[in-house]
Image (tube, helix red, strand yellow):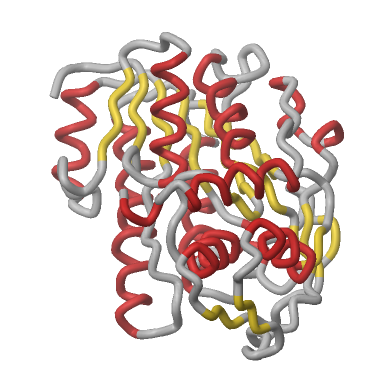
Amino acid sequence: MTSCEVLVTGGHGFIGRALMARLASEGVTGVVGIDRSDFDLADPDATRRHLAELQPRTVVHLAASLHRDPSPESRRAQWRDTFAVGRNVIESSVELGVAHLLFAGSADELGDQAGVLGPEVPARPITVYGLCKSLLRELADFHARACAMRLDWFRPFHVYGVGQRGSSLIAYACEAASANAAAEFTDGTQSRDFVYVDDVVDWLVAGVRSTGGEADTNGLIMHHLGTGVATPVRDVLAAIAAEFPSSRFQLGALPRRPREPDCQIAPPPETAASSQWRWAPRVSLAEGIARTAAWWRAGAGDR
């Protein structure tokens, strides 16, 4: 590997691929995206060695375990591929003098708290994934207070869109509908803040292009990325079903998760710290679902 300006961990993941493509399309040079096929970020020595070779000015950390079920295997994956990986990225970035770290947190850090959840709301995780992210944020804040690095900790709410696969609500529903397979859900009365992947990428690109946000600002800055709009899950599923008339969604077939809050949304973007980069989501939920459904209809599962 050669030196770079911007390093993206998880560069082959859902958000990482979208970010890499956008940076390339906008002519941003010196960008390197990595994943576990390049080296193991859970190995502290390998992480420090490769970051020393790459010498990035900015690191965008997106890598984490996608295993979110309560099984022992999933918990082990979280401690290794979310916590240990994140710790190594933070500590190596501090040691090597990275100027700017944009680090993906999660709304899972907020646990069972409900309502409009701003950056001032304390963490109260109820999942191992949320716990790992919450502990990493404490570690990041500890280091950011003692060095000159700017650290933007961003919590995107429910990200969806073209390129996403897996168990996340919209991806799971679209995959099942496109395959004409039955899909089971809870009653869908809970409301969430759904933000399209391109809008999250807009924020990340603004962060990469910045010199760290406000002039001479160091330390950890918290950001909650969402639309500020609460949409019931059953309404999202109805919109997906309209895109796939043969869909077979079974609402009420699954119980709600223990302690799952009825409503979680980010503050309106114009009131949030993220507005310092003049960011606001541009893609409506209706448009985002239409784009995502079209991608699945075009044979996304075969690619």
Name the image quarter holding the N terminus: top left
Evaluate whether residue 130 shows in this view. Answer: no
On screen, residue 171 above or below 146? below
Residue shown at 32% from the left, 41% from the top: 12
Q: Position of residue 234 (x, y in %)?
A: 76, 71
Q: Position of residue 71 (x, y in %)?
A: 38, 85
Q: For residue 78, which quarter of the picture?
A: bottom left
> In the depicted view, which residue is nearer to us: 123 or 10?
10
Number of callouts = 0
On screen, residue 101 above or below 140? above
> In the depicted view, which residue is nearer to us: 105 or 23?
23
Residue shown at 65% from the left, 83% from the top: 250
Evaluate whether residue 24 shows in this view. Answer: yes
Q: For residue 98, which quarter of the picture?
A: top left
Specify whether 43 is left or right of 294: left
Specify whether 29 is left or right of 102: left
Specify whether 189 is left or right of 80: right
Specify whether 38 is left or right of 190: left
Residue shown at 64% from the left, 55% from the top: 158
Q: Position of residue 295 (x, y in %)?
A: 50, 45
> In the depicted view, which residue is nearer to us: 281 or 243?
243
Q: Position of residue 64 (x, y in %)?
A: 38, 55
Residue shown at 49% from the left, 52% from the top: 296
Q: For residue 42, which quarter of the picture?
A: bottom left
